[in-house]
Structure formats: C-alpha cells, structure tokens
Image (cartoon, helix red, strand yellow):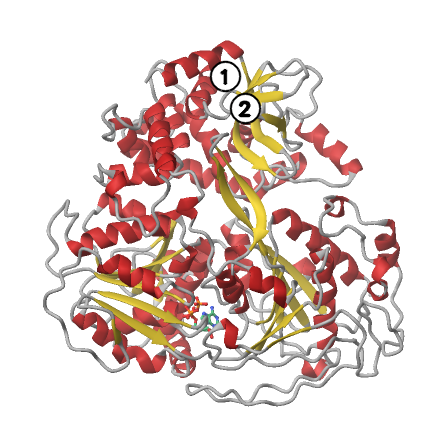
C-alpha cells in the first residue's frame, strides 16, 4: 500500500497504455512483495494515499465535501464540490438531516478511520474473499420456483392458505417496511388514478425513488389488469435483478411454471417466465420479439417502458409500435377488449418530448378531469413527477482534469478503503472490458500488499461480455471484513441496485456505438457521457443509505456534457430495426412514428442491406427469408447465414449453428493470457484446435471437441486454456438455436439431435460470406488489407489465429469490426478472392 503514497510509484500510463493489462511494472512487483509498514500519513504532503497504522488518521483525504441538497430535484440544484488527491487532515463528516418530505433520517456519522473491526459488518453471507467467491449460480439456484428448484423449496413450513413458504412471506413483510419509505409510495394512488383515466402515463422520479420495483406492483390489482404486466429494461442484468427483487417484495416464487411464481424475466437465450407470471421483466429486444408473435400484445394489460432516457434503437421501436397501437393506426390481430395501458418512465426522461410524441394523432375527445398530484398533459396522457430521493448522495469533482483516470480511480478506491468504515462497497464506472481488467489487476496487486488487519478488497468485474452467472455475482452479499469493488461499464448505469454500494466513482466516459456509414461498419469509441448518464451513475449510490459520488472530471467538464445521450437510432446501423418493422407489417418505414427520425440516407442504406441479404423483396416488402430471419434471436446477418446453411446445396446448418453459437456468447472462448511463458504453453495446448482457415473454423473445432468430450469437460477446458463458462454458454445457445431452426423448419427433429461429421469447410465459408459480404477485404501489394466496400484499411486483430501469419490469405471475411487506435478485423477467416467476387456480384445484382 505504501507504494501508493508516492505519485510516481503508480504505473505511469495506467489510463491509456494497454500494457498495464499485461505485466505489472517492476515497481509494482516490488511493491507487492514488500510487506507494508505503516508510515506517518499526516506528515506526507505529496499527492497520494497512505495509511498510518493505529492512529485513526490512516488516510489523507481531500477537501471536505458538501452534501447534495436533498431532494436533489435537478442536478443543477445540488451542491457539489471538488476534491483533491492531496494531503489534508481528514475532515469529519457531521451528522446531518435529510430535508426530504418523504424520508427524514440522520446521515450516519462517518468516522474517518480505517475500518476498525468493530465498525466492520457482521458476517453477511456467501462471498468469502478472493479464493472462495462462490461459484456462479446456475439460474435455477437463484429461483424460488419449486418447479425449478425442486425438493429444497418444498421443505420448510408453508402458509396453509396460500401454501407459500413462510420464509418468503416473512421476507415480504420485512421488505414492506422499507418499501413504505420510498418516495414513490405516497404516489401509488395518483398513479393508479392516472391509468384509470388515461391509457398513457409518463412518469419521472429521482433515481432510487422506487419506479421500477413499485409501479408494476401498484398496478397489479387494478380492475383493468387482468393479464400480465411487461416491464422493459435496457439490459439483462437489470431485468434479472429486478425480477428477483420484486419477487422477494411480493413473497412470490420467481420464474418458471408454478402457479405461485408471479414474477419472471425473459432475456435473450434465457426465459424464466411462465403462464402464471403476472409481472415480467424483459429486455427491450425480447419485447420486440414478442411483438412480432403477438402484434396486439394480447398477453399484457400494461407495458411499462423503463429507463426510456437510454433511447436504444429497440426502445424507439417499442415506443413507435405502442403509439400506433394506442392510436389505432396499427391493428393487425384480434382486437383487444380493453386498451393496453402504457407507462413510460425514467429519472431523466424528456417528458415534454414524450408527451408531444404520444399526443400527436391521438383522439382528443372525452377529456377526463384533472387529478391532484397529476399534471394533466392532455386527454389521453398523464404525467406524474415523483419528488424526492431516499438518501442523499454527495457529489465531488476533481479540482483539475486528470490525464489518467484509471490511476485516479485506483487511488480513490484505496482512499475510500482506508478512510471509510465498513460496510460500504464501491462501484466504479469505466469504459470497457480492457480498462476493467487493467484496473482489476492493479487493485488486486496493491491489495496483496495491505496489512493483514486491513479488511480485504473483493474486486468484481461487470461488463456485457461476461456470462450471466458471472454478472450476477455482484449481487451476492459482501463477506465479513471485506469491501466489494465492482468495476463496471455502463451496463450498471441504470435500474440496478447493487446491495451494499455506498460509493460511486465515475470516469465520465463510455463506449458509444457509432455507425461508420462509409465503411458500412459499426465501431465502439470511448466518448464523454451525457449529463443524464452522469446523474444515473450517481444514482447507483444512495439507495440503501447515504452515498457519495466521485466524478473523475472537473465540474467545468461536467457542464460541457450534452444534456442527453444521442439516441442510438441516429448513430447506429438500422438493419435490424427495419427488419423488425417490416416483419410487424410496417411497410412504409419512412412514415413510422419515430421519436427522433433517423436520417433518410441511413434508412435507405439499411433497406438496401436488407435487400442484399434477400430479406426484402424488390418492392420493399419482407420476403419469406426476411420473416424467418426476424424470428431468429440473432442479427439479420447471422440469421441470413443460418438460412443459407440450411439450403440443400450447402447442407452445413449444424456446423454453422455451432459457429454462430460461438459468435453469440459473451465470454471469450480463449483466455487472454498475459504472461509470455503461459502464452507459449497455451498456444501449444490449443494447437490442435487452431485451423488454418481462420477463427470461425477454430471455433467450430473447439465447440465440437468440447461436445465430444464425455469424461470431464471442465478438465478439458483447463488443459486447452479454454473458458469452461463460455463453452457451457455456447452449448446452451447451440441447443436453443437448433430448436429455433427446427420450429422454422430449417432442421428436422432427427437432424437436430445428430452429431456433426467432418465439416465441409468451403460450404461453411460460403455461408459466412453470404452474410458478411460487407465485411470482406482483399490483400494489397503492401501486405495490408483493404475492404471491398469503402476501400478502407483494416488490420487483423491480435486475438485472431490469423494474426501475424507470414503467408497471408488473398482475401478475408470477418465477423467483427473494432475501431480503437486503428481499424481492426476481428474473428477472421481466409477466403478465396473469386468466392468474394462471386458473392459480391450476386448480391449487387439483386
Ligand atoms: N436488489 C435490491 N437490493 C436492495 N435494495 C433494493 C434492491 N432493488 C431495489 N432496492 C431498493 O428499492 C429502491 C427502489 O429501487 P427501484 O429500482 O425501484 O428505483 P428506481 O426509481 O427505478 O431507480 P432508477 O431510476 O435508478 O432505476 C432502491 O433505492 C433500493 O433502496
């Protein structure tokens, strides 16, 4: 830890040098080995963090912060301050009252000491440190549904009337006490009244005020609510954790088929809902899929679109479809007997824009009277604003811009750890997996050097490319005498309550998807976040008690942030969105009610791409192929490849399913080995899996070897430096894709259970080319690759088995494009030039 005392002792280029991810610096290694002896803190005037053992002044900490005004209705109203990573005598935080109408309780007194043993929480549960983190739960283990969990759930006492286990009811009653203190609680009746009078409600309220968990429960017993309520979430981690929480609050089983399982969720490749589910949390993509099967949404009485401010393409489509349903423009199936109720909510929504959007083309007759607590927008739309935050969050800025925010985050984590008593977990927002892994390594390295009596740090990553069970680990209780440090991308930005989190560190950036129309490819670039995103990040603290948010940027920087994130529909590839619209019978996409209309040329480009995939007829109507693709839970490109592989002349569907399952898993199949020695060992072990044709055939070989392994698959993975978790996930996706191909009659049941034979490499590559025709490049005389479309230079990514080959393929097809410091082709296969030319000709002639 003492290494952290000196500014110069931290790795110099932590923020932008990829090398921190690979090898710890010599300094760091030395620092790790040394047992840190306490050194006076208060006499050190350099920047850094330090401890002084046993003095109660172990940490220096910066300028005293001020608390937010609570309720902090608007970001601008909150009192914020800057802090320095410099030496100051620690200021004591005083007991203060929360001036909130809904909840007035003293803020806990914070002793600025290393957490003394007495301040440390009682043993709280399952996680037990670095080496005994519980193994990721299988989904069933998270569920209360006896149909899933079997015997264990049948044990224990049950309520004789409801036959629900007593422990669930006890938990429900306990949680009711805290639910009643939520700012939204007093608004329950207004919300019900609003939806009795109008069909559309736009609801805003502070982060943590109770929107996502309470609103569906408020509506459940309404007379109009005879069917289920759908609640959409931008991300699966939120959908799953909210479903679990609401099930607990309702004393209900969770997921599955049991009549007592009232709450469920549905995310891609994982459906934990059944016919008795009354509240279903779904990702936006899953609701869109349901909208294709059930255009009038007959299985739902209400749809709640949560976190609408995120403005993903999917949410914009959902809003457009819902608006059409509400205004009667679109009516494709059986007419609904009762109108669908629509709730749109967020802490940072553009209320005016939404009201205007839903208000256009509405029938303005039958004006209901205005209600107290509701601002009446017009005859069919209500607005409700929930004031107040449950707990205050103090916001602190850097006094001057940091060149290296990974390093700033590292210092701050240790400052918090040494200064703040337990419990109090830390949630750090970073840009992506690479930065998360760098910081995880740094924190773990420094933590090894901490004194024995300092509580442990338990670092947990959270990013999209992590399997679901691994993501769910963050919700496990923090073990005794430990502090969780969650390193997350913006997937933890909205809707999620991570129990135990008191401190949020926000780097102020996130990776934004950008469609590079010239290239016809999407890239992810780290860009400053919007004010709305910063507010959401801050809102992850202050949910279970007072919190603090440290912004790794200056207040002046904050003021330059855009108010809202630019809607994804204005900056991404629209192919999937248009296919979904066409499949739902929207023939005139240019006339679709978009909340923000994408540029006409982007729409036209996407239409052409779909035409080239054969998903549309020449007149613009959806083709049979397009209808099939739309029903597959993969991108249009991957869907097209599956359809191609099912053709009798290709006859390689099972193999292609394996490859697509491998491309669809979030985890990396091959561990990223950093040490040179281990790298050589891994290369040798994986040699039998590598294929000269490239990454796709390598994935196929890996999946097939794994599937053939009958003795010990985990050991097989260890021997080959392959992620067992990724392989388990791939097997699950493979099974589901086989089932879906069966239901679309691309496979028959006998084929669906056969094991693969020797792959027909040429046929497989031809199928990949048919889908990824835009992702092709040819070898140039200077040994670089240039894309066929756009004529851009791309380099083969170092993670590819084709990287660094002396004899280069004359042409390549790739399934991922990455733009960092330069353009990379990822997941690459070698193909022949004339194959590409043939496909290009075929496709361009449509
Ligand atoms: N998994 C959980 N564990 C502990 N407390 C929780 C959990 N989920 C919710 N809560 C409590 O319920 C409160 C309300 O959460 P909810 O997600 O409904 O708020 P919200 O208004 O939707 O917030 P946001 O706008 O940030 O999504 C939280 O502040 C927290 O106190």
Q: Quadrant of the N terminus?
A: bottom right
Q: How many marks?
A: 2
Task: Report the side of 421 relative to 573 (left or right).
Answer: right
Find out whether the residues at labels 1 and 2 contact each other: C-beta distance under 8 Å: yes
Please state the horizontal and vertical placement of residue 4, each as a whole percent of the image: 82, 64
Residue 761 numbered tag? 1
Q: Secondary structure at mark 1?
A: helix
| Quarter residue 767 falls in | top left
Task: Report the side of 604 relative to 310 (left or right).
Answer: left
Position above or below: 513 against 77: above
Q: Ligand 1 appears in which quadrant?
A: bottom left
Residue 697 numbered tag? 2
Task: Report the side of 30 relative to 532 (left or right).
Answer: right
Q: Quadrant of the C terminus?
A: top left
Task: Report the side of 731 relative to 457 (left or right).
Answer: left
- Which residue is at a point 14% across and 63% down the rendered structure image? 364
Q: Is mark 2 within 8 Å of ligand 1?
A: no
| Alpha-carbon span between mark 1 and mark 2 | 8 Å
Position above or below: 552 against 843: below
The earlier-in-sequence mark between 1 and 2 is 2
Q: Nearer the viewer, residue 260 or 474?
A: 474
- Which residue is at a point 25% across and 43% down the rendered structure image? 292
Q: Nearer the viewer, residue 406 or 53?
A: 406
Please state the horizontal and vertical placement of residue 187, each as a whole percent of the image: 31, 79
Q: Secondary structure at mark 2?
A: helix
Please state the horizontal and vertical placement of residue 21, each as a whole percent of the image: 72, 46
Position above or below: 416 against 236: below
Residue 575 seen anywhere in this rendered image of the structure: no
| Quarter residue 218 falls in | bottom left
Label 1 neighbourhood size at 10 Å, few (<14), some (14-19), many (20+)?
few
């Amino acid at each position: 830890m003492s290494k952290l005392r000196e500014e110069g002792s931290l790795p110099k280029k932590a923020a932008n040098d990829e090398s921190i991810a690979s090898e710890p610096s010599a300094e760091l290694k030395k620092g790790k080995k040394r047992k840190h002896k306490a050194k006076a803190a208060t006499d050190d005037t350099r920047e850094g963090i330090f401890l002084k053992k046993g003095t109660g002044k172990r940490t220096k900490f910066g300028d005293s912060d001020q608390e937010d005004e609570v309720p902090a209705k608007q970001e601008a109203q909150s009192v914020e301050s800057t802090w320095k990573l410099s030496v100051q005598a620690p200021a004591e935080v005083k007991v203060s009252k929360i001036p909130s109408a809904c909840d007035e309780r003293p803020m806990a007194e914070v002793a600025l000491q290393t957490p003394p043993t007495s301040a440390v929480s009682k043993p709280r549960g399952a996680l037990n440190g670095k080496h005994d983190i519980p193994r990721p739960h299988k989904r069933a283990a998270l569920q209360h549904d006896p149909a899933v969990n079997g015997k264990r759930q049948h044990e224990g006492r049950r309520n004789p009337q409801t036959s629900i286990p007593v422990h669930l009811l006890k938990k429900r009653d306990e949680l009711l006490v805290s639910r009643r203190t939520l700012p939204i609680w007093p608004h329950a009746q207004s919300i019900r009244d609003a939806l009795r009078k109008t069909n559309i409600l736009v609801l805003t309220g502070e982060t943590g005020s109770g929107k996502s968990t309470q609103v569906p429960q408020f509506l459940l017993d309404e007379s109009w609510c005879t069917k289920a309520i759908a609640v959409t979430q931008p991300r699966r981690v939120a959908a799953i954790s909210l479903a679990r929480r609401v099930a607990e609050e309702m004393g209900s089983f969770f997921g599955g088929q049991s009549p007592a399982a009232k709450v469920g969720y549905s995310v891609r490749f994982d459906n934990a809902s059944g016919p008795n589910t009354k509240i279903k949390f779904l990702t936006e993509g899953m609701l869109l899929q349901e909208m294709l099967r059930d255009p009038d949404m007959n299985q739902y009485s209400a749809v709640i679109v949560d976190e609408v401010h995120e403005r993903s393409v999917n949410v914009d489509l959902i809003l457009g479809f819902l608006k059409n349903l509400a205004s009667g423009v679109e009516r494709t199936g059986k007419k609904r007997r009762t109108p669908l109720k629509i709730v749109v909510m967020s802490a940072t929504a553009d209320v005016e824009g939404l009201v205007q959007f839903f208000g256009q083309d509405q029938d303005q007759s039958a004006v209901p009277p205005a209600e107290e607590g509701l601002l009446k927008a017009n005859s069919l739309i209500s607005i409700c604003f929930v004031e107040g935050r449950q707990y205050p969050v103090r916001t602190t800025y850097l006094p001057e811009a940091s060149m290296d925010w990974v390093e700033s985050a590292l210092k701050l984590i240790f400052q918090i750890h040494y200064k703040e008593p337990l419990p109090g977990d830390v949630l750090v927002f970073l840009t992506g997996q690479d930065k998360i892994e760098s910081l995880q390594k740094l924190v773990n390295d420094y933590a090894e050097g901490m004194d024995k009596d300092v509580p442990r740090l338990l670092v947990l990553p959270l990013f999209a490319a992590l399997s679901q069970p691994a993501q769910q680990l963050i919700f496990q209780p923090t073990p005794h005498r430990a502090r969780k440090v969650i390193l997350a991308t913006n997937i933890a930005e909205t809707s999620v309550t991570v129990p135990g989190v008191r401190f949020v560190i926000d780097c102020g950036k996130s990776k934004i998807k950008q469609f590079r129309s010239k290239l016809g490819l999407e890239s992810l670039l780290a860009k400053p976040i919007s004010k709305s995103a910063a507010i959401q990040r801050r809102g992850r603290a202050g949910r279970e008690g007072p919190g603090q948010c440290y912004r790794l940027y200056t207040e002046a920087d904050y003021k330059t942030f855009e108010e809202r994130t630019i809607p994804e529909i204005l900056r991404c590839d629209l192919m999937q969105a248009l296919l979904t619209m066409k499949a739902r019978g929207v023939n005139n996409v240019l006339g679709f009610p978009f909340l923000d209309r994408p540029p006409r040329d982007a729409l036209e480009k996407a239409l052409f791409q779909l035409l080239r995939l054969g998903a549309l007829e020449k007149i613009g109507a959806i083709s049979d192929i397009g209808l099939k693709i739309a029903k597959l839970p993969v991108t249009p490109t991957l869907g097209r490849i599956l359809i191609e592989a099912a053709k009798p002349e290709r006859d390689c569907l099972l193999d292609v399913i394996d490859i697509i399952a491998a491309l669809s898993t979030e985890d990396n199949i091959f561990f990223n080995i950093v040490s040179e020695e281990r790298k050589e060992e891994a290369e040798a072990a994986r040699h039998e899996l590598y294929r000269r044709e490239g990454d796709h055939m390598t994935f196929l070989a890996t999946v097939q070897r794994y599937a053939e392994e009958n003795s010990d698959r985990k050991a097989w993975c260890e021997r080959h430096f392959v992620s067992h978790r990724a392989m388990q996930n791939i097997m699950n996706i493979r099974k589901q894709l086989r089932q879906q191909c069966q239901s679309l009659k691309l496979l028959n049941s006998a084929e669906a259970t056969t094991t693969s034979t020797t792959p027909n490499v040429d046929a497989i590559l031809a199928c990949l080319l048919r889908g990824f025709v835009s992702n092709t490049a040819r070898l140039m005389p200077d040994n670089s690759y240039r894309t066929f479309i756009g004529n851009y230079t791309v380099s083969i990514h170092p993670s590819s088995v084709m990287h660094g080959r002396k004899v280069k393929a004359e042409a390549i097809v790739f399934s991922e494009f990455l733009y960092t410091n330069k353009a990379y082709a990822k997941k690459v296969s070698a193909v022949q030039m004339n194959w590409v030319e043939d496909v290009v000709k075929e496709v361009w002639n449509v």
